[in-house]
Amino acid sequence: MKKQIYKLMVNEKSTITSEWLIPDHFQTALIIAHGAGNGMDSPFISYLHKQIANHDILTVKFNFPYMEKARKTPDRAQVLEATWLKVIDSVIKKTHLSAEQIFLSGKSMGGRYASMIASKQNFAVILYGYPLHAPGKPLNLRIEHFKTISCPILIFQGTRDSLCQLDKLQESLEKYAPDASLHIIEGGDHSFKTLKRMNRTEESVWQEIVLKTVEWINKSNAPEKHF
């Protein structure tokens, strides 16, 4: 396993850091974006980054410009999307992988923008805690763009997520993305923390997410499953 740090210029004002874990042998790559409140070195993102790479999948995590500059307010949508595109372009150029071998993913906000990129380009997407709506506003759903995603979708969602009423997500997926795969974390909140009475450790939940992610990537990338 080799670790590489690459600085990527998003625009004339912003350069971001990306960290790559490169297995000796890989056929697929997973790009992981952080959520609004935590950067690429958050415990959850770092766990995914390392553990998924241990399964011979090249993994890349990165900071959005505002996080790189230690700001609290996320960048404008245009900058968030431009950052995603810059990282994707870098992965394609450095690995020579095809679009069907590259998977986009992200926690919360990072996943939301991954799905927006996937709705315009040919990439499969994995969403860790999709922010279907703002807190307390379950009528304003951020999902209509799913209908233009033609590649596979995998979503991890906790049953206690305050940013995603599960029944509304299920209804929306039936309408906009009937082929999407939904993996439910019973008792999990937006950070996948479960209730004490469920007697589950944080790592056991994260490990479940890693193993399901790896299984899904390998299945999606099997020759007969190419899209």
Image (spheres, helix red, strand yellow):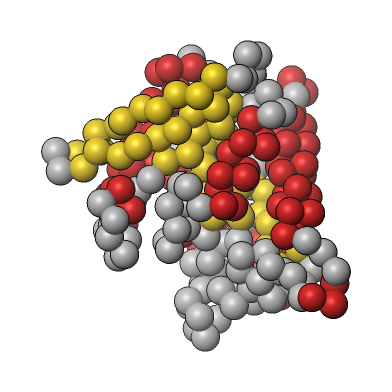
Question: Quarter-wise, where is residue 188 in the image?
Answer: bottom right
Question: Horizontal placement of 102 versus 86: left or right?
Answer: right
In this picture, is 60 found above or below 126?
Answer: above
Question: Quarter-wise, where is residue 151 in the image?
Answer: top right
Please tell me which residue lies in front, 47 or 139: 47
Residue farthest to the bottom?
136
Q: Position of residue 179 (x, y in %)?
A: 71, 50
Please tell me which residue lies in front, 71 or 169: 71
Q: Residue at x 50, y 33 (%)?
A: 60
Q: Residue at x 77, y 75 (%)?
A: 195
Q: Residue at x 47, y 51 (%)?
A: 34
**Where, quadrant-wise, is the N terminus in this rendering?**
top right
Q: Position of residue 214 (x, y in %)?
A: 73, 36
Q: Is residue 103 visible?
A: no
Question: Horizontal placement of 130 versus 197: left or right?
Answer: left
Question: Horizontal placement of 63 versus 159: left or right?
Answer: left
Q: Is residue 173 visible?
A: yes
Residue farthest to the left?
12
Question: Quarter-wise, where is residue 200 in the image?
Answer: bottom right
Question: Horizontal placement of 75 versus 111: left or right?
Answer: left
In this picture, is 5 found above or below 48?
Answer: above
Please tell me which residue lies in front, 224 or 5: 5
Q: Position of residue 63 (x, y in %)?
A: 38, 45
Q: How many marks?
A: 0
**Where, quadrant-wise, is the C terminus in this rendering?**
top right
Q: Position of residue 72 (x, y in %)?
A: 31, 64
In this picture, is 139 found above or below 127?
Answer: below
Q: Residue at x 73, y 54 (%)?
A: 203
